[in-house]
Image (cartoon, helix red, strand yellow):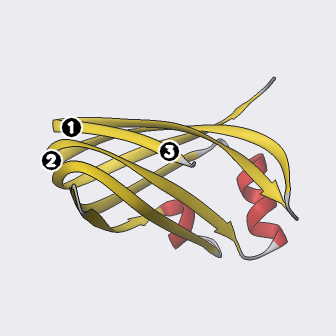
Amino acid sequence: MPLMTEAGLGIGGAYGRGALRINGFSVDYYSAAKASAGLQLGAQQYAHVLFFMTEDALMDFRHSSGWAAGADIEYALPSGGRTIAAETTTSLAPVIAMVFGHAGLRLGASLEGVKYTRIIP
C-alpha cells in the first residue's frame, strides 16, 4: 500500500490501496482497512509493503479471506517515525512486512485487525 492514512483517539482506523506486483507487473489491486483500539492519539500517513518469500505464502495470501490480527507500538513526528508490530500475516507465514515513510503526529500502542480486500475492476 503506497499510502495508508491512519487516525485514532483510543479507537482508530486506517485505509489504503495498492497493487500486488509479481515479477515487476501489477497483477491484482487491494485495499487495506484497519481498526485498532488501545492507547493511541493522532494521525499519520505511511507506506506499507508485504514481501512474500515463498510461492506458497503468496498463494495463501491471494486465496485467504484477507483477515490479519496484530499489535503495534508506533510514533510519528513531522521528522519521521517508527513502528514495532506483529501480525498474523507475518508471524504465521514467510512474509516480511515493512512500514516506512511516516508523516504526521501520532503516538500509540494498540491491538488491531486488518482486512485486505481484492479490488475487482
- Please tell me in which quadrant of the rendered image residue 99 appears: bottom left
Amino acid of disc 2? Gln
User: Which tag is nearer the camera, tag 3 or tag 1?
Assistant: 3
User: Which tag is nearer the camera, tag 2 or tag 3?
Assistant: 3
Relative side of 83 to 17, left or right: left
Q: How crowded is mark 3: few (under 14 residues within 10 Å), some or many (20 or more)?
A: some
Identify whether 88 is placed above or below 66: below
Please give the name of the residue rendered at 27% of the width and 64% of the height, measured from the top-left corner: 81
Q: Which mark is residue 82?
A: none
Amino acid of disc 1? Gly
Q: Mark 3 points at which residue?
A: 3
Amino acid of disc 3? Leu
User: For this rendering, which residue is in front, 106 or 104?
Assistant: 104
> Mark 2 falls on what kind of element?
strand
Please give the name of the residue rendered at 15% of the width and 47% of the height, measured from the top-left corner: 40
User: For this rendering, which residue is in front, 43 or 95?
Assistant: 43
> Mark 1 falls on what kind of element?
strand
Q: Mark 2 points at which residue?
A: 40
Please give the name of the residue rendered at 16% of the width and 47% of the height, measured from the top-left corner: 38
Q: Residues within 10 Å of mark 1 (few under 14, many from 20)?
A: many
Q: Where is residue 61 in the image (x, y as percent from the top left)?
A: 71, 54
- Please tell me in which quadrant of the rendered image residue 108 appears: bottom left
Q: Where is residue 55 in the image (x, y as percent from the top left)?
A: 84, 70
Relative side of 100 to 56, left or right: left
Q: Residue 8 carries which label?
A: 1
